[in-house]
Image: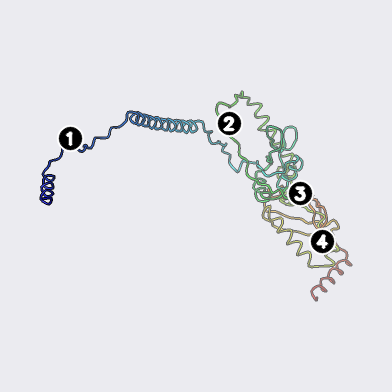
Amino acid sequence: AISVHLRVTARMAEATPPSSNATPPKAAEPTATPASATVSSTSADTETTSTIAAATSADTQSTSAVAAATITAPAEPVYIDIDPRKNPHIYVTGLPPDIELEEFYDFCRKCGIVAENDEEEPKITLYHDAHGRPKGDGKCTYVRVESVTLALQLLDEAEIRPGFPVKVQRARFLKRPANQEKDKPADKSKGKERGGKRKPAKHQKLLGWHETDLKPKKAQGVMILKPCFTPSEFDADPAYVKDLEQDMKTECEKFGVVKKVTIFDRNPEGVIMIKFLEDEALAPAIATFKGRFFAGKKLEAFPWDGKTKYKVEETEEQREKRLKAWENYLES
């Protein structure tokens, strides 16, 4: 009986439908976005837009600054076009900070005669800054343009003092803007007096010995140097005269073509005569040699007047002595 009851009960339990009070499963509900999140997103978009606008503004300002810089950039300097064949000026840089006009003058005159102003002062300039301190540069004006060429060859990168090599170049001059040009009344008579007569006359006076002095043709381009030796030096070494002649020719060829070197070996003043092909070589040569020391002797350099005789006739005794020394030299 019990077994039957259990089976009936089990079947009844299987046949019983689920209760109507049971809670059905909930359907998935859509996720709602909070209002605060929407506001935050809108704010972020606004900030992004503001950032882009600021960047665009910065780019605009940068472009404006570049344009302004381009507009206000200083113009390239414009120089006066001067024919090098008519430019007697040199510009020198690298000068010592404590240099004086006299030292600068002595350095420049090695290559030619320095022009003078109306006060008969050398036309040389040392430039200073706004506080009056030397800038280390200067300008020199020569009487002859050929001196500029020589200065570029001899003085450029030369040391005006130990440790002070200088740079030498042809001087250039800035062109004055049109709005800064000074109106000067035309005075032809004054211009003729100052530019047409006075200046050339002054230069002729400075040159003193140039061809304008109507010196003999044979004296043109001839320089005299002394004292360069003593006659006894040739007695001790007869071959020294040839060595000295070659050394002098090599040194003088820096200024122009040398036609002839004459050594007056019997002259007690130790005179040497150098003849250049062109008279223009005299100015720089004389300026360079004058005051220099050669073999321990301070040299004098000047143009030959075409009259002075430097050859000294030797006595018969001196001649025999010289020939004997030469024979001994050849045998040895």
Could you tell me if the residues under marks 1 and 4 are in contact, i.e. CB atoms within 8 Å? Answer: no
- Give the SS element for disc 3: strand
Q: Residues within 10 Å of mark 3 (few under 14, many from 20)?
A: many
Q: Amino acid at mark 1?
A: Asn
- Give the SS element for disc 1: loop
Could you tell me if the residues under marks 2 and 1 are in contact, i.e. CB atoms within 8 Å? Answer: no
> Which badge, 1 or 4, is on the more N-terminal residue?
1
**Residue 265: which disc?**
4
From the image, tell me which residue sits under label 2.
Answer: 176
Tag in front: 1 or 4: 1
Q: Looking at this view, is 60 or 76 the one in front?
A: 60
Could you tell me if the residues under marks 2 and 3 are in contact, i.e. CB atoms within 8 Å? Answer: no
Q: Looking at this view, is 200 or 46 the one in front?
A: 46
From the image, tell me which residue sits under label 3.
Answer: 303
Measured as percent of width and height from the top left, residue 165 is found at: 69, 49
Q: Amino acid at mark 4?
A: Asp
Q: Amino acid at mark 3?
A: Pro
> Which badge, 1 or 3, is on the more N-terminal residue?
1
From the image, tell me which residue sits under label 1.
Answer: 21
Tag in front: 2 or 3: 2
> Which badge, 2 or 1, is on the more N-terminal residue?
1
Q: Residues within 10 Å of mark 4 (few under 14, many from 20)?
A: many
